[in-house]
């Protein structure tokens, strides 16, 4: 029923550019939020200078862009690069394609698959989910994303049976998802990681995919952590919250045995820390948000991102945000009803449309 099309889509396609004139506003990566030169662009000052230098290298001196002011650089490029329909096209001026791709990956939200053009409610794949979550890892230095993993993550199988396994002897036995098999809270905390987001598919590794669910782990009160350990970014919604685990299934079902075992492992590790950490458990058992059979992946993304950032779309205000404290986040996912139509909005925020 909850088919997700968890294909092995682990490839990278270069973003296409189109020559139609004008520049469309794109969805920005969270990495550059509040760092861009104006609200009409996803470019930060340092990236605009790189593009300007690349532009000058490929043009005659009488066409040079002389400005050092990023705002003036943006205005000039916006006027001159009229063959670009979207801002990502500007990166084509950079001859170093590896650098251009690296910049694109941190500046713009990922493109959604072309299948969405014909079916706007296409199921999310593992690649769709990981592309979004990787950008939040880059934004919040105290956050780590694990997955998306099949439900039999601690089963040992031949390395050669797993398309995502690290290189090695194909006949060696490895866990279906090594990061979950060897999860170590003490090591994560030493690295300044205090927030964990996990997404699971309820099918096994050798099945096509059925339903996405998620787990959020918060390891301690954020206000007590040194900013040097968290990249200087501590969402206010975390400042006073204690350690907790929240299991979220958009259909309101109880966690499967595999995830219950994982949660118990997290609790045991936390209690063995010095000083011991007691983790509180939350879930939305019995609270069915999802009514269609297509949005479980979007619910999983929305859950983790909202728990991490403490922010969500304000439907009453254009481009407005609601800021949630800890209790507000718990009530939202445990007690309120979040309709499918609401999370569908985020398909147009977490992703960019290909053309």
Image: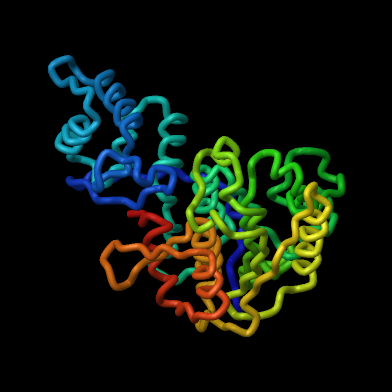
Q: Quadrant of residue 141?
A: top right
Q: Left or right of 208: which side holds 116?
A: left
Q: Report if residue 119 is visible in the image.
A: no
Q: Quadrant of residue 330?
A: bottom right
Image location (x, y in percent) of residue 333: 54, 73
At x 54% / y 52%, what residue is drawn? 133
Q: Left or right of 34: which side holds 200?
A: right
Q: Left or right of 194: which side holds 158?
A: right
- Looking at the picture, does residue 171 appear above or below residue 347? above
Q: Nearer the viewer, residue 48 or 325?
A: 325
Image location (x, y in percent) of residue 277: 75, 55
Q: Nearer the viewer, residue 308 or 349?
A: 308
Q: Among all residues in the image, which is located at the extreme top?
A: 61
At x 62% / y 71%, what residue is drawn? 248
Q: Left or right of 264: which side holds 65?
A: left
Image location (x, y in percent) of residue 206: 74, 63
- Looking at the picture, does residue 98 appear above or below residue 134? above
Position of the C terminus, as image quadrant, is bottom left
């Amino acid at each position: 029923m909850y088919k997700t099309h968890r294909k092995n889509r682990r490839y990278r396609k270069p973003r296409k550019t189109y020559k139609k004139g004008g520049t469309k506003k794109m969805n920005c990566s969270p990495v550059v939020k509040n760092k861009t030169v104006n609200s009409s662009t996803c470019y930060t000052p340092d990236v605009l200078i790189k593009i300007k230098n690349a532009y000058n290298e490929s043009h005659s001196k009488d066409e040079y862009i002389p400005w050092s002011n990023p705002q003036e650089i943006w205005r000039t490029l916006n006027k001159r690069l009229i063959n670009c329909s979207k801002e990502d096209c500007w990166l084509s001026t950079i001859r170093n394609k590896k650098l251009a791709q690296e910049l694109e990956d941190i500046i713009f939200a990922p493109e959604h698959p072309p299948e969405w053009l014909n079916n706007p409610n296409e199921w999310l794949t593992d690649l769709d989910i990981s592309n979004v979550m990787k950008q939040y890892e880059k934004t919040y230095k105290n956050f780590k994303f694990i997955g998306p993993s099949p439900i039999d993550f601690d089963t040992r199988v031949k390395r050669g049976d797993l398309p995502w396994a690290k290189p090695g002897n194909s006949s060696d036995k490895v866990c279906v998802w090594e990061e979950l098999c060897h999860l170590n809270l003490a090591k994560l905390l030493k690295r300044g990681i205090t927030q964990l987001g996990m997404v699971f598919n309820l099918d096994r590794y050798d099945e096509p995919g059925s339903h996405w669910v998620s787990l959020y782990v918060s390891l301690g009160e954020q206000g007590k952590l040194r900013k040097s350990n968290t990249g200087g970014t501590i969402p206010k919604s975390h400042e006073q919250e204690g350690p907790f685990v929240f299991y979220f299934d958009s259909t309101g079902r109880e966690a499967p045995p595999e995830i219950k075992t994982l949660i118990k492992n997290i609790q045991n590790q936390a209690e063995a820390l010095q000083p011991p950490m007691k983790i509180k458990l939350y879930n939305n058992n019995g609270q069915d948000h999802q009514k269609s059979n297509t949005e479980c992946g979007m619910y999983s993304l929305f859950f983790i991102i909202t728990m991490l950032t403490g922010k969500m779309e304000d439907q009453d205000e254009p481009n407005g945000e609601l800021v949630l404290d800890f209790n507000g986040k718990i009530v939202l996912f445990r007690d309120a009803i979040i309709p499918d139509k609401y999370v569908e909005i985020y398909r147009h925020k977490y992703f960019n449309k290909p053309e």
